[in-house]
Amino acid sequence: MSALMDVQILEDVQAVIREGAIHVALFDQIARATVVLLLAWIVSRLLRRASASVRHQVWTVALIGVALLPLLSLTLPTWQLPLLTSVTESLLEPSDRYEMVKIERELTPMPTSQGALSQPPSSPQTWAMGGSASRPVGLWQRLDLSTWCVLLWALGTAFFLTRLLVSYVAAWKVSRDAVPVTDEHLLNEVAALRRQLGIRSKVLLVEHAGITMPMAWGLARQTILLPTAARDWNPERRRVVLLHELAHLKRWDCRTVLPARLVRALHWFNPLAWIAMSRLQAEREFACDDLVLTAGTPGPDYAQHLLDIARAMQPSRSPNLAMVAMARPSELEGRLLAILDPSQERGGKGRPARVAACLAVGLLVLPLASLQLSAEGAADPGDDPVGHGAMVSDGGDEPLDPATRARVLKAYHAALEDEDSDMRTQAAHALGTIEDSESVGRLGEALRDEEATVREQAAWALGMIEDASAVPMLASVLEDPSSGVRTQAVWALGMIESEAAVADLIRIANDASPEVRQQLAWALGMIESDAAVATLERTLGDEEAQVREQAAWALGMIESPSAVGALSSALADDPSSAVRRQAAWALGMIGHDSALDTLLNAMSDTDKEVQKQAFWAVGRIAD
């Protein structure tokens, strides 16, 4: 039962992903983001002799643009360029266009929890596989490639977003526990450096004993955090540290890094996202170093200060904070080389290049946001209805026009007589997805096909169409040599829910296949005929626990008081806790006072789930 419910959950997830086109939207966003980040990488390489602030701004614009792409895609008008059609088709459709569609041999799970017990089970699902494949498909093998991609992306994104959230929570805690600096001399020095850099907003200066590295923090209020050891620094070191951290605040580094980190979390699988984040962090530090140097600090002296601060850093005491630290050891080598390079551009001539580079990247984002890279519905099913084209959708937003629909149906009807059994099977499946009542006669003829797979698929299709005229056709195969065909025919009769099928279903109540008997109980429960009560009561004595369980569910669906005695016996004596639990539910659904004694006794059942179900049933009868 648990395995069957797991299967249903997986298939429901896959249906949401497929029907909601989540995979298509995800592939579109991946393609757009890759184009933007690739262009930013190319531009930054072309500007390798420009100042670090120019390259940093290029990466900033690119990452913010990628972060805004989903929103812009929803608001801007779209134009289509079907570049990803072949990619998405390979992920969405089976690679073998002639593959055989088989009917799953597992039955629909019955309701077992109170919240779902009053609902009838859903219909069996289909699964596709190449070759003959008579063995059942594994739980995770039911997921197609597109669903796997979306699920893996979601898991990875959840992991990296959680890490991001944890880092900001840690930063908030450090900021909350920090103590404001009261040294007037130091505060006056910060005010003077703010005026020198042209920073108009106030800057909060705090210190914290738990950090070893100067940091900037500025989402809500611009803040500089100093380690308590900063009290012992000489004036020159304090000056360069404050200049560097104020440079981060002037450049809004603490605020622009958030969308960049979000992009890396959402595109964690894309190497370009990691490259972009790495380059953004490196160029950010280079740009702040340039600002400190242009403020009059000698290069060798500044390099020595950085080395001393990095040596004092204690990684074990430095939490993963969403703050901008001054001198991380992993970034130090490149920064020292740049600081000591007299030929390095420090930003004096970078404004025109910065504007041009940002325009080049920024102007690409808008057309990319409105560009639809994957073609939806590009193929006309009527042109190639079987084998090479896309199948007709069941429940698409735009139904086919009558002329095209007639062409499609004609092609599928002809395919039912193809010499290739795989083609006949696929045609029967397609007619089931279309749910066209005009195809009932052709599918009835397919029930006499020499191949069991074709007969099985034809029975499924008739169940999907749910036309009462198919009842005699399905009844004719209830004694088919293939248990799979019999099972699927019984399921189809249950879907049609016609009283006319009850007598034929009762006739095969002793079928040799447990799967057929279990599906039979489900079908009788779906039809809800009092004429089936006696048969279902006898089925409560079946040798298979799953069959007995389904019979109890069916009696609960019919709600006949005459079944109370048989269900009470099953609740009291059946060795299977699943059967007892289902019997308690059925008695609750019937709601007859004569079941109260048995239900009250069941409150002491050895199985907790049976106890819970008995409590629920008693409460329902008492109401």
Image: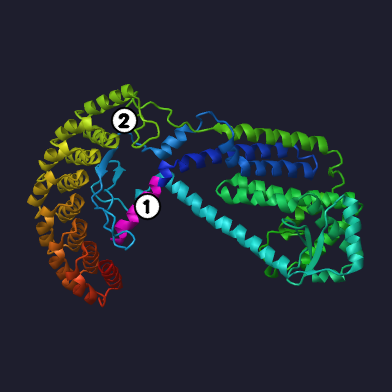
Give 164 or 292, whichever is nearer the viewer: 164
Residue 89 lies, in percent from the top left, at: 42, 35
Give 583 or 530, whichever is nearer the viewer: 530
Seen at 19% across and 57% down, the residue is 554
- Does label 2 or label 1 sit earlier along the sequence? 1
On the image, numbered disc 1 is attached to which residue? 10
Where is the N terminus found, in terms of image quarters? bottom left
Total tally of numbered discs in the picture: 2
**According to the image, what is the colour scheme of the structure?**
rainbow
The numbered dot on residue 387 is 2
Verify whether residue 14 appears in magenta: yes
Q: Amino acid at mark 2?
A: Gly
Magenta span of residues? 1-15
Q: Main secondary structure of the magenta part?
A: helix
Where is the C terminus found, in terms of image quarters? bottom left
Q: Label 1 neighbourhood size at 10 Å, few (<14), some (14-19), many (20+)?
A: some
Give 81 or 135, whichever is nearer the viewer: 81
Residue 519 against residue 471 in the figure, above or below: below
Seen at 92% across and 52% down, the residue is 296
Residue 315 lies, in percent from the top left, at: 69, 67
Residue 233 visible (yes or no): yes
Residue 410 lies, in percent from the top left, at: 25, 24
